[in-house]
Image (spheres, rainbow, N blue to C red):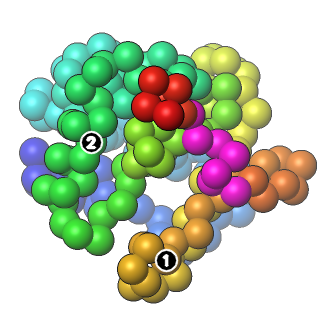
Amino acid sequence: AEEWITKVHHGENNHTGEFSSVEEVLEFANNRAKAASDSMPACLGGGIGSPSPVWMRDYSQPADGVPKNPKAQMMIDAALEALGDDVQRMVMGHTPQRHINAALKGKAWRVDVGASAGVASGTPEVLEIIHAGDDDDGGDVVNVLTLNGKRIPSSERQVLDTNMI
């Protein structure tokens, strides 16, 4: 799995962003996704709905709502803690939402807006994370950028569990 992550999934990235057209970007992304999925080890893949790292949806379902798994907060807290003190959040896709949003006290950012016509024809948005240093509060500024030029603060995209308030 480690070899797949480092060589196949992240090995042939165009980090310089030297593309001449949107079509070229899309072709590159499609080819990269196909190569990655064709060679993905079974322990990572497993197909849609499996509990693998690629398809696990415990933090994202139902869409635009509080995760239905009652252990989701405990699970994400433990996962982020295991990754290190400087890891504050997880960003995920594969479960379309109406808009980019955060659940589980801002620790689970769900960024799949189903923008593809083959999924939901959702409106594209971008999650912006500006790392501002090592302040006690984390120091990061998190916003959602929209097509119409709005910068929406993270506080306006939190999905809250009303049972916890």
Q: Which residue is mark 2?
A: 76
Tell me residue 135's x, y (percent): 43, 83
Label 2 CA crowd tier, 10 Å (few <14, some 14–19, many 20+): some
Q: Is residue 118 a member of the stretch shown in magenta?
A: no
Nearest to the observer: residue 112 or residue 6: 112
Q: Kindly identify the amino acid type of the residue bearing the numbered disc 2.
A: Ile
Nearest to the observer: residue 29 or residue 101: 101
Q: Residue at x 36, y 61 (%)?
A: 88
Q: Residue at x 52, y 41 (%)?
A: 102
Indicate which disc, 2 or 1, sits on the residue closer to the N terminus.
2
Tell me residue 114's x, y (percent): 62, 26
Residue 96 visible, this angle: no
Q: What is the quadrant of the N terminus in the image?
A: top left
Q: Residue at x 42, y 73 (%)?
A: 138
Q: Which residue is mark 1?
A: 139
Q: Is residue 83 left or right of residue 43?
A: right
Q: Kindly identify the amino acid type of the residue bearing the numbered disc 1.
A: Gly
Q: Which residues, given as a range, are shown in magenta?
A: 153-159
Does 76 sit above or below residue 48?
A: below
Q: Quadrant of residue 27?
A: top right
Element under disc 1: loop
Q: Residue at x 72, y 27 (%)?
A: 122
